[in-house]
Amino acid sequence: MKREIRNLSLILEQLDRRHVRLGLAVLTLALFVLGAGAPMDGGGY
Amino acid sequence: MGAATDRMILLLAVVAGLLFGLARAWYGGRPLRSPDLRTAWLVPIAFLPQWLAFYLPVTRRLVADNLAAASMVSSQALLLVFAWRNRHQPGFWSLGLGLALNLLVITLNGGLMPISPETTTRLFPGISPDTWEVGDRLRWNVVLPDAETRLWWLSDRLLTPAWFPYRHALSIGDVLIAGGAFWLLWALGGDKATNIQEKKGV
């Protein structure tokens, strides 16, 4: 039982770490795109 | 001008890429991979001057035009370093080339992205064309006629189609940036071997 809980926590830890890394990467990409582009919006004028 | 939606069209490419990448990963029975980005810490640092000069209401009112222009150029130059450091990643050649083209036309025209009075009038059809004067600053754009714009063909002159919910003027660089962001996220949904082939153009 202890072993199963440990395995489960390891899986969750890995899953969380992967999600956090992916989230940070997407956030970085979004910031990059916001900083690199210079479009002009006429929609809300 | 829609302060919140100016660059949102580029974020649409990120959202679309994420959705398509997830769908691709799901179809292939694999998780969406995380890219191994180098010097990612550089991106928030690079974005900070633009945030202060163009986004944060408290500071952007205080920033003079020449300082705003300098913050744009320095910020994009730092982002170019990040793009170069990550050129091994799928989509980054497109992201970097798009950024380089934007930075080139911005730098050659005084630090802001030029937009012609004709494009501005097409973008805001409800406003009299006489309203726009050469040299007017519109956020990170500056109104300049083509004859006075260096490399005018790299400026904001591509309009989104009429059926699109938001009207935007984009540069060639913006299109390459949107394509690169989509490509990167799409590639994350594939397996590593496929990505290597995609990167090599096989």
Image (cartoon, rainbow, N blue to C red):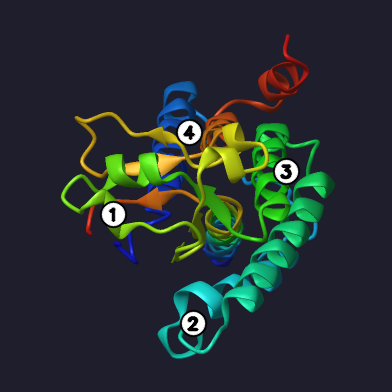
The residue identified by callout 1 is: B130
The residue identified by callout 4 is: B21
User: Looking at the picture, how far across and down is residue B105, in whole percent?
Assistant: 67, 45
Mark 3 chain: B
Residue under the point 38% across and 40% down: B119
Circle 2 — which element? Answer: helix
Mark 2 or mark 3, earlier in chain: 2
Could you tell me how far apart the alpha carbons at marks 4 and 1 are, in whole angstroms? Answer: 46 Å
Mark 2 or mark 4, earlier in chain: 4
User: Looking at the picture, how far across and down is residue B199, in whole percent?
Assistant: 73, 23
Evaluate whether label 4 is on the same chain as label 3. yes
Mark 4 or mark 1, earlier in chain: 4
Quarter of the image with the C terminus of chain A in it: bottom left
Viewer-side residue, B80 vs B39: B80
Could you tell me how far apart the alpha carbons at marks 4 and 3 are, in whole angstroms? Answer: 26 Å
Viewer-nearest of discs 2 and 1: 1
Circle 1 — which element? Answer: helix
Evaluate whether label 2 is on the same chain as label 4. yes
The residue identified by callout 2 is: B60
The residue identified by callout 3 is: B100
CB-based contact (under 8 Å), mark 3 and mark 1: no
